[in-house]
Image (tube, rainbow, N blue to C red):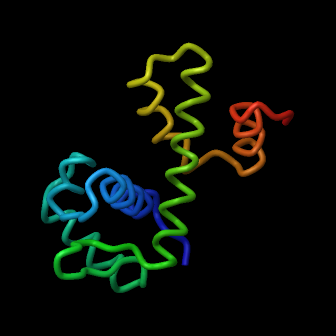
């Protein structure tokens, strides 16, 4: 199943919060993404129904293997693209914002070339 950009953003946000805080609550996802709590509830329901997410007592929102794969891919793209833009002289806040826009639409070939450059390899 192909995920919409917004679903990828939700999965990425859950991963980011988990790395920072451990347990993830819906309200934290809403705050990070700047969306309403009801919007998060609807999205979490869809992600659970499609096998990307589970809710566990004490742990909050937990990514499944499939959810983690998507979230990790998107988050890696975000970090690499942010770093690349900063290497070009873009201020960090703008770089992170622009990376959010680019991470979903950039071709795999272009992403791999940028990643190679960021990691100090030849493209």
Which residue is nearer to you in this view: 92 or 97?
92
Q: Position of residue 32 (x, y in %)?
A: 25, 47
Would you say 43 lies left or right of 95 here?
A: left
Q: Residue furthest right?
A: 122
Would you say 102 lies left or right of 20 here?
A: right
Q: Residue furthest top?
A: 89
Residue 25 placement: quadrant: bottom left
Q: Is residue 69 above or below residue 51?
A: above
Residue 14 placement: quadrant: bottom left
Q: Residue at x 59, y 39 (%)?
A: 80
Q: Is residue 84 above or below residue 72?
A: above
Quadrant in which the N terminus is drawn: bottom right
Q: Residue at x 41, y 33 (%)?
A: 97
Q: Position of residue 18 (x, y in %)?
A: 32, 59
Residue 13 placement: quadrant: bottom left
Which residue is nearer to you in this view: 99 or 83?
83
Would you say 9 lies left or right of 36 here?
A: right
Which residue is nearer to you in this view: 118 or 108?
118
Would you say 100 lies left or right of 46 here?
A: right
Quadrant in which the C terminus is drawn: top right
Total marks in image:
0
Q: Residue at x 46, y 72 (%)?
A: 67
Q: Is residue 29 above or below residue 52?
A: above
Q: Position of residue 51 (x, y in %)?
A: 42, 84
Q: Is residue 57 above or below residue 86?
A: below
């Amino acid at each position: 199943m192909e995920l919409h950009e917004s679903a990828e953003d939700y999965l990425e946000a859950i991963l980011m919060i988990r790395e920072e805080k451990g347990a993830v609550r819906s309200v934290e996802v809403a705050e990070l993404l700047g969306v309403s709590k009801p919007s998060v509830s609807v999205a979490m329901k869809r992600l659970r129904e499609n096998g990307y997410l589970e809710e566990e007592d004490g742990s909050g929102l937990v990514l499944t293997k499939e959810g983690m794969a998507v979230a990790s891919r998107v988050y890696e793209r975000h970090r690499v693209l942010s770093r690349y833009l900063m290497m070009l002289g873009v201020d960090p806040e703008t770089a992170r914002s622009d990376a959010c826009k680019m991470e979903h639409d950039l071709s795999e070939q272009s992403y791999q070339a940028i990643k190679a450059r960021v990691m100090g390899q030849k493209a």
